[in-house]
Image: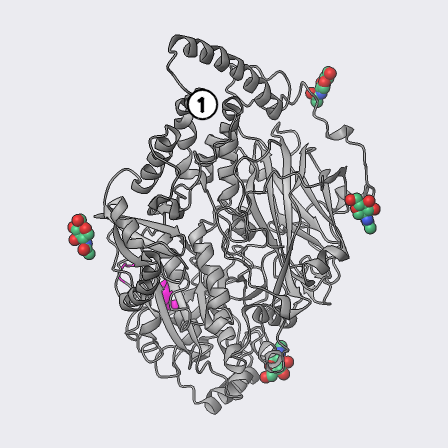
């Protein structure tokens, strides 16, 4: 009765609550994001926990926000632990308790700001007389379109008079009348100067908010709050007498401010799909640090918000996300180490300079879809700046490339508003233009050229709008997940790799209603003493090679990849049937840093066969990889092989001096063994003395020269014997002690300790925090074995810290290897197929 009543009340409250939660004040309060069962009354839950109910959590179904006065503890987690303790001690019964309605709870933590992806470009104007014919043509265009903007002639990315042809090729689109009318782009950044004469007419306040200062307008306030305004100018600066024009100069532009202070996952999740029925495209020129040693993905709430937007935003066609690829190329950074740019939901845009050259900063990766113009070689992007009539001529980095993409996509949406988020990616793939700069250009299944450095080539506004006009919409999305492939083998050092194969059959894809590949993601665990030494390739059945990961000289992290998901767009259009081979390499022989390839799982994402049977992907949860160690009759077929490093480039070959080219790094080294599979594992076997077995306990404990897993069992057995004897003694001594399993309380602190960081980098593309919980659980299983029952409660929901740093997580959990132990908790993992 009461529950039903709540159902009605909930709708009413939702409507009454209006669109905004009350502003947060993190200096006076703690905030909790809680996911509950649908029939739960948040107010009752709040009353039970002594929290204040703030309201529903944006677009996330059954998620709510609560607050409490600032306190060191996590009130919700403490209450859950207390209930579990009482139940174990039989002080509380198993009957329903309000806390049982909680699926997931997260106390919000302020996390470091994202990095803006601008670089300080060289100021010097490039020399060389403009081509006079080009100038004449440019004036003609300006006259026809009545463009009088004072810096229009400097805006070479729109019309390049010095190197004709090296621009976005948009003026023909404008002539056809497509200028962004009816489309809204939202710049998620450090604010937007809506008072600027160049932006005020196109500014869209309803789609704007400030999540740093919790107020309605995204006013730039800090001295360096210029980035968002510059990006906005590139997209939608008006055709007027201020500065220049945006690529979609009649589009609406909104601003959501998140980069001007520390932020929580809660606020970032609200920001990333803010007003998703009114904002069509989100422009994101930021991300985790581009320092060549960070590996960071959005937290689970942000991931949920992005998936929700691609399913429900824009009237169900899906919000368009555009991310700047990143500026860390000079430090060997790669956009596959960034969980935003390697999301299947984002269009990742890298940069080229006005000569179609690779600017030193722009990162490469297999998740990069396209490039466009930005700073480099003595020029930069000229656009609007903060101030009534201020302009800049030094906007740059991949930060400046992303918004050019956004402007072009606004024109595409004006031409075809009904395109889905996937159609937009298809159009990019089909129309991006390869160019004559050496790279690993490789012909793909769709007869397109792909390069890890330049994606499918440079964006061409004319080409994509023309293609969009009669584009046949793709059928809904389907997906196929391989089982977890358990490899658990030492990675040989050097050019040899450790390969593992999964064979996808026609039947598997038919059952998955899967017709052809768009994105692939690969989630993997690799233990390694120096993460930066690793590289990973994925070879598809058709022979296309994705360089999922490349070595990073600054990445000293003393562990490998933990449930990290890599992504590739290089297999777009492949049928997917056949052998998919993943090759893990240790690129730094002789530094005594070694590792083990633990496991991996392949996911194919693409177009379905039968649209009538398609369903939207379930919203990801923190438990999605809980089936990590399930043994399902698919042992990995693993060989230690030397493969030819890549299919031959078809357009141009690679110069040897190119520092951040991710592929064909040592073409000569692999030639000798090209194509020959060495099935012997002998070379992979570590010299037992040279490579000591990793010790699962601190050094005073001998490792017995066996694997960590065996050590765990040896020590586990010793511990069990010890605990048994101690337990027996205790039992005899204190006869009234009822249950030996209570002894679990004695180690509970140890596992709970991991809670705050447990859910470390939740991954956009499917790998969530769940598997880490699972691993943390396994830490306790040795003891459980003695207690004779599983203890799924000890580590169920916990605080999934935002941007939990991998380092701290690992210190706590490196003792867990990929043990085969039966899973304890009955996994509710959303197996999608
Ligand atoms: C937030 O809380 C602090 C501490 O209680 C207070 O000083 C400050 O004025 C509050 N800020 C706002 C905007 O209410
Ligand atoms: C640019 O657009 C024009 C139409 O305005 C088109 O003919 C041309 O092929 C496009 N590409 C280039 C590189 O000029
Ligand atoms: C695919 O891999 C399997 C082993 O998993 C192997 O037996 C088979 O020959 C491979 N097929 C091809 C075409 O390489
Ligand atoms: C491997 O072990 C042998 C002894 O069994 C030793 O002579 C040799 O030096 C070791 N190799 C390396 C690379 O350490």
Q: Residue furthest front?
A: 1
Which image quarter is the C terminus in?
bottom right
| In the image, residue 225 lies in the stretch drawn in magenta | yes
Question: Quarter of the picture for ligand 2?
Answer: bottom right
Viewer-proximal residue among 77 and 739: 739
341 up-or-down from 780: above or below: below
Q: Main secondary structure of the magenta part?
A: loop
- At which x and y percent is residue 553? 56, 40
- At which x and y percent is residue 382? 43, 71
Q: Residues within 10 Å of mark 1 (few under 14, many from 20)?
A: some
Residue that badge 1 annotates:
741
Q: Name the residue: 52% across, 88% down.
A: 175
- At which x and y percent is residue 482? 67, 49
832 up-or-down from 551: above or below: below
- Number of labelled discs? 1
Q: Is residue 680 left or right of residue 512?
A: right
Q: Quadrant of residue 686?
A: top right
> Assess mark 1: CB under 8 A from ligand 3?
no
Viewer-proximal residue among 595 and 718: 718
Q: Name the residue: 49% across, 51% down.
A: 621
Viewer-proximal residue among 689 and 619: 619
Viewer-proximal residue among 545 and 748: 748
814 up-or-down from 114: above or below: above
- At which x and y percent is residue 364? 58, 55
Which image quarter is the N terminus in?
bottom left
Which secondary structure lies at badge 1? helix
Q: Residue furthest bottom?
A: 144
**Can residue 549 be seen at all in this image of the molecule?**
yes
> Which residues, given as a range, are shown in magenta?
221-230
Q: Quadrant of residue 530?
A: top right
| In the image, residue 558 lies in the stretch drawn in magenta | no
Q: Quadrant of residue 279?
A: bottom left
């Amino acid at each position: 009765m009461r529950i039903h009543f709540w159902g009605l009340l909930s709708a009413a409250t939702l409507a009454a609550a209006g669109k905004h939660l009350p502003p947060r004040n993190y200096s006076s309060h703690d905030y909790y994001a809680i996911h509950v069962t649908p029939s739960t009354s948040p107010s009752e839950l709040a009353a039970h926990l002594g929290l204040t109910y703030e309201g529903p959590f944006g677009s996330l179904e059954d998620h709510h926000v609560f607050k409490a006065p600032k306190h060191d503890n996590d009130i919700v987690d403490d209450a859950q632990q207390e209930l579990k303790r009482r139940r174990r001690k039989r002080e509380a019964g198993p009957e329903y308790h309000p806390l049982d309605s909680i699926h997931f709870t997260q106390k919000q933590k302020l996390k470091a700001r994202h990095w803006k992806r601008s670089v300080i470009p060289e100021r010097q104007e490039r020399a060389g007389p403009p081509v006079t014919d080009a100038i004449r043509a440019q004036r003609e265009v300006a006259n026809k379109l009545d463009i009088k903007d004072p810096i229009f002639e400097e805006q070479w990315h729109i019309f390049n008079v010095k190197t004709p042809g090296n621009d976005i090729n948009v003026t023909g689109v404008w002539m056809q009348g497509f200028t962004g009318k009816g489309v809204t782009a939202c710049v998620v950044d450090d604010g937007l100067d809506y008072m600027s004469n160049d932006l005020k007419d196109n500014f869209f306040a309803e789609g704007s908010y400030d999540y740093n200062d919790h107020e309605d307008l995204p006013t730039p306030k800090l001295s360096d709050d210029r980035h968002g305004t510059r990006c906005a100018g590139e997209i939608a600066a008006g055709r007027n007498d201020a500065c220049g024009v945006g690529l979609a100069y009649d589009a609406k532009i909104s601003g959501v401010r998140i980069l001007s202070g520390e932020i929580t996952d809660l606020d970032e999740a609200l920001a990333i799909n803010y007003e998703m029925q009114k904002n069509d495209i989100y422009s994101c020129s930021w991300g985790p640090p581009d320092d060549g040693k960070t590996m960071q993905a959005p937290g689970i709430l942000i991931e949920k918000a992005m998936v929700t937007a691609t399913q429900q935003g824009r009237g169900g066609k899906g919000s368009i996300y555009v991310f700047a690829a990143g500026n860390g190329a000079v430090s060997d950074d790669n956009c596959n180490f960034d969980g935003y740019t390697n999301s299947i939901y984002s269009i990742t845009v890298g940069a080229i300079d006005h000569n179609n050259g690779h600017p030193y900063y722009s990162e490469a990766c297999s998740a990069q879809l396209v490039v466009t113009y930005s700073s480099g070689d003595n020029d930069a992007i000229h656009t609007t700046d903060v101030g009534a009539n201020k302009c800049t001529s030094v906007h740059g980095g991949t930060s400046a490339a992303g918004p050019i993409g956004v402007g072009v996509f606004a024109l595409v949406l004006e031409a075809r508003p009904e395109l889905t988020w996937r159609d937009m990616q298809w159009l990019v793939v089909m129309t991006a233009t390869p160019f004559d700069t050496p790279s690993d250009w490789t012909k793909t299944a769709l007869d397109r050229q792909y390069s890890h450095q330049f994606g499918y080539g440079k964006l061409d506004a004319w080409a994509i709008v023309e293609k969009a006009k009669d584009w046949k919409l793709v059928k809904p999305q389907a997906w196929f997940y391989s089982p977890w492939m358990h490899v658990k083998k030492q990675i040989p050092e050097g050019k040899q790799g450790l390969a593992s194969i999964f064979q996808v059959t026609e039947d598997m894809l038919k059952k998955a209603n899967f017709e052809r590949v768009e994105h692939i993601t690969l989630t993997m665990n690799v233990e390694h003493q120096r993460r930066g030494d690793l590289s990973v390739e994925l070879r598809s059945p058709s022979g296309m090679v994705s360089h999922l990961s490349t070595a990073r000289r600054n990445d000293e992290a003393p562990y490998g990849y933990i449930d990290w998901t890599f992504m590739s767009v290089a297999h777009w259009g492949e049928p997917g049937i056949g052998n998919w081979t993943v090759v893990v390499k240790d690129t730094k022989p002789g530094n005594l840093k070694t590792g083990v390839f633990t496991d991996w799982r392949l996911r194919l994402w693409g177009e379905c066969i039968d649209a009538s049977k398609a369903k939207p992907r379930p919203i990801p949860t923190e438990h999605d990889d809980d089936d990590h160690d399930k043994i399902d009759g698919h042992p990995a077929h693993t060989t230690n092989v030397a493969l030819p490093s890549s299919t031959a480039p078809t357009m141009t070959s690679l110069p040897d001096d190119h520092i951040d080219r991710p592929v064909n790094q040592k073409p000569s080294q692999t030639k000798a063994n090209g194509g020959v599979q060495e099935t012997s594992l002998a070379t992979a076997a570590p010299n037992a003395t040279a490579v000591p077995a990793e010790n699962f306990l601190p050094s005073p404990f001998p490792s017995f020269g066996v694997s960590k897993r065996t050590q765990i069992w040896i020590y586990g057995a010793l511990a069990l014997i010890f605990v048994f004897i101690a337990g027996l003694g205790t039992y005899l001594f204190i006869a009234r002690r009822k249950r030996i399993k209570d002894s679990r309380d004695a180690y509970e602190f140890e596992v709970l300790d991991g809670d705050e960081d447990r859910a470390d980098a939740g991954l956009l593309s499917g790998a969530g925090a769940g598997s880490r919980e699972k691993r943390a659980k396994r830490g306790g299983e040795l003891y459980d074995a003695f207690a004779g029952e599983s203890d799924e409660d000890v580590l169920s929901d916990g605080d999934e810290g935002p941007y939990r740093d991998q380092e701290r997580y690992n210190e706590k959990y490196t003792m867990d290897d990929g043990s085969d132990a039966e899973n304890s908790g009955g996994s509710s993992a959303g197996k999608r197929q």
